[in-house]
Amino acid sequence: MAPHTEQLTRPAVRLRGLTRSFDGRVVLDGIDLDIPAGQFVALLGHSGSGKSTLLRAVAGLDHEVVGGGELIAPERVSVVFQDSRLLPWRRVLDNVLLGLDGEDAAGRGREALAEVGLAGRERAWPSELSGGEQQRAALARSLVREPELLLADEPFGALDALTRIKMHNLLRELWERHRPSVLLVTHDVDEAIVLADRVLVLEEGRIGVDLAIERDARARGEYRGRLLAALGVTEDVR
Ligand SMILES: Nc1ncnc2c1ncn2[C@@H]1O[C@H](COP(=O)(O)OP(=O)(O)OP(=O)(O)O)[C@@H](O)[C@H]1O
Ligand SMILES: [Mg+2]
């Protein structure tokens, strides 16, 4: 196989037998998962089901995780959390540029800020930005590194409903333009269906549901029902 084709077909993330326990309690119980390059995956699951633990393992932040077989992730990985984690004593552009070098770094940082709608706010302090703007700055900081894999742990969890919808559009737009693989942890079934091409449900330490999402609005109600059922939620609003 030519190197180029190989690059296209090789999964960006490959997990085999990923296991993690805390004090003898098994949280991840032999997870097998492949994420093809460029795929947008959402990960659902109850609170405490191990979503963040899985994400941290893929990010390479957990040195005690046991890969029975393999834990392969790309070299360039960016992580976005529920809070923006901007350093309060650095201006917005300096936060975006943190740890970045190269002659054109500042230019790329400005471009990334413009992409998330923060042109002109480069010299603001993080405390001068709204919650949504801080999350956009965090997205710019991850994008400027041109990640092959974007990991996001409930990045919109703390935002109001309206801002969240705007952030959904922005994230989907950025993904379409840059095409990293994405693993997005969320509590929100609708967010998962709107954003992702594939939705996973983590239950009892395993991937219990692995659902491909067609981008057809008519199918959304059906996905919603299936995912809510998998999460043991019944909607009974009369
Ligand atoms: N450092 C740790 N030490 C001990 N237990 C931990 C640690 N990190 C996670 N756990 C436990 O592992 C389980 C899974 O935690 P995790 O944070 O991955 O859940 P989650 O699915 O992300 O939940 P949430 O939706 O509430 O964020 C929990 O029971 C948690 O208490
Ligand atoms: Mg979590």
Image (cartoon, grey):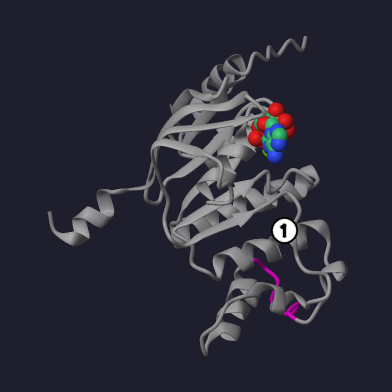
Residue 97's spot in the image, x, y percent?
Answer: 63, 77
In this view, the residue in front, 164 or 198, is: 198
In the shown orientation, is residue 1 left or right of residue 208? left
Q: Which residue of the protein is positioned furthest toward the right in this rendering?
A: 127
Tell me the amino acid under the disc marked 1: Gln
116 versus 188 height, above or below:
below
In this view, the residue in front, 52 or 166, is: 52
Task: For label 1, count other residues whose C-alpha is less than 10 Å away and answer few (under 14), some (14-19) or many (20+).
Answer: many
Range drawn in magenta: 116-122
Which quadrant would the C terminus be assigned to in this image? top right
Name the element at disc 1: helix
**Taking the image as drawn, is residue 170 in sight?**
no
Which quadrant would the N terminus be assigned to in this image? bottom left
In the shown orientation, is residue 89 left or right of residue 19? right
What residue did someone put label 1 on?
Answer: 135
178 versus 83 height, above or below:
below
Does any atom of ligand 2 lie closer than 8 Å to the CB of label 1?
no
Residue 191's spot in the image, x, y percent?
Answer: 63, 37
Query: What residue sits 55% from the left and 47% below the top?
Result: 63
In the shown orientation, is residue 50 left or right of residue 16? right
Query: What residue sits 57% from the left and 16% below the top?
Result: 230
**Taking the image as drawn, is residue 221 in sight?**
yes
Query: What residue sits 56% from the left and 50% below the top?
Result: 151
In the shown orientation, is residue 200 left or right of residue 128? left
* Quadrant of the displayed image that contains ligand 1: top right
In this view, the residue in front, 18 or 192, is: 18
In this view, the residue in front, 60 or 167, is: 60
Q: Which residue of the protein is positioned furthest toward the bottom in this rendering?
A: 103
Residue 89's spot in the image, x, y percent?
Answer: 83, 75
Examine the image and state in which quarter residue 90 appears.
bottom right
Residue 223's spot in the image, x, y percent?
Answer: 52, 23
129 versus 93 height, above or below:
above
